[in-house]
């Protein structure tokens, strides 16, 4: 029985906790709106500064909301892409195990650049001191630690089986294309 190769790119939806995402965006929006309203009423240099800073926070919040709603993963041969309308980040896959990591639902687990309420994304560090790129938009979903050439990527996806299958196919194509013996990725569970 022959398997039909997947059509590339394979788009993978990220796991999202809509309530937490809405809370993160709403808090930032309220802070920015407070600055705009207060700055508009205060007048003078202090009012202008508050107005401008509040406006920047509102603009940042709009960009953050766009990112949180549209960000997705795409698996292509040899690479994993994190895409949203403004930017595409490419991660070259490296042979190795995709590690399933069940995490605690606490805040700041990886000390990522941005986050709150259990949601994290950006550069972070594991408890072992390993540098990671973290995309965790739902703290209830186990993370998949994907080996890449730069650093491991910690990502929470909706359909873990489809994600791992796409990574295995992408890595096998890479290895076969280079004449290297096939060493597929595996899904190993490691509780935390």
Image (spheres, rainbow, N blue to C red):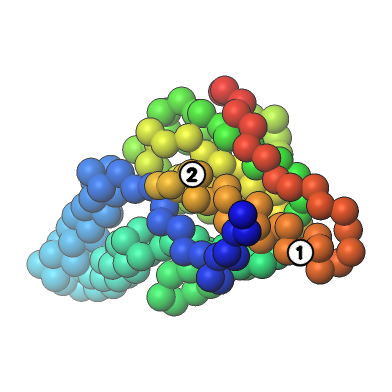
Looking at the image, the residue that sits furthest to the left is: 41
Coordinates of residue 112 in the picture (x, y in percent): 53, 45
Residue 160, label in figure? 2
Coordinates of residue 110 in the picture (x, y in percent): 55, 38
Q: Nearer the viewer, residue 25 or 88?
A: 88
Horizontal side of 58 relative to 151 (left or right) equals: left
Coordinates of residue 90 in the picture (x, y in percent): 62, 67
The secondary element bearing badge 1 is classed as helix
Relative vertical location of residue 145 with respect to residue 11 in this rendering, above or below: above
The answer to whether one can see residue 16 in this image is: yes
Relative vertical location of residue 91 with respect to residue 99 in this rendering, above or below: below
The answer to whether one can see residue 60 in this image is: no
The mark total stands at 2
Could you classify mark 1 by the number of other residues whose Cα lies within 10 Å: few (under 14), some (14-19), or many (20 or more)?
some
The image quadrant that residue 63 belongs to is: bottom left
The image quadrant that residue 28 belongs to is: bottom left
* Residue depicted at x 63% and y 59%: 2
* Residue depicted at x 75% and y 54%: 94
Marks 2/1: CA–CA distance = 21 Å
> Can you say which quadrant of the picture contains the N terminus?
bottom right
User: Pointer 1: what residue?
Assistant: 174
């Amino acid at each position: 029985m022959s398997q039909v190769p997947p059509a590339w790119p394979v788009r993978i939806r990220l796991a999202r906790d809509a309530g937490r995402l809405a809370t993160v965006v709403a808090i930032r929006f309220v802070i920015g709106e407070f600055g705009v309203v207060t700055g508009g009423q205060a007048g003078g240099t202090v009012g202008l500064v508050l107005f401008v800073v509040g406006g920047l926070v509102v603009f940042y919040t709009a960009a953050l909301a766009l990112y949180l709603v549209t960000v997705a993963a795409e698996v292509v041969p040899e690479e994993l892409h994190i895409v949203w309308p403004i930017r595409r980040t490419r991660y070259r896959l490296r042979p190795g195990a995709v590690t399933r990591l069940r995490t605690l639902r606490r805040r700041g687990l990886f000390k990522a650049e941005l986050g709150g309420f259990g949601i994290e994304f950006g550069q972070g560090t594991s408890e072992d001191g390993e540098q990671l790129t973290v995309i965790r938009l739902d703290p209830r979903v186990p993370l998949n630690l994907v080996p890449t050439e730069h650093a491991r990527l910690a990502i929470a996806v909706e359909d873990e089986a489809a994600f791992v299958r796409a990574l295995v196919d992408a890595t096998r194509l890479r290895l076969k294309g280079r004449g290297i013996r096939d060493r597929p990725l595996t899904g190993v569970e490691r509780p935390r």
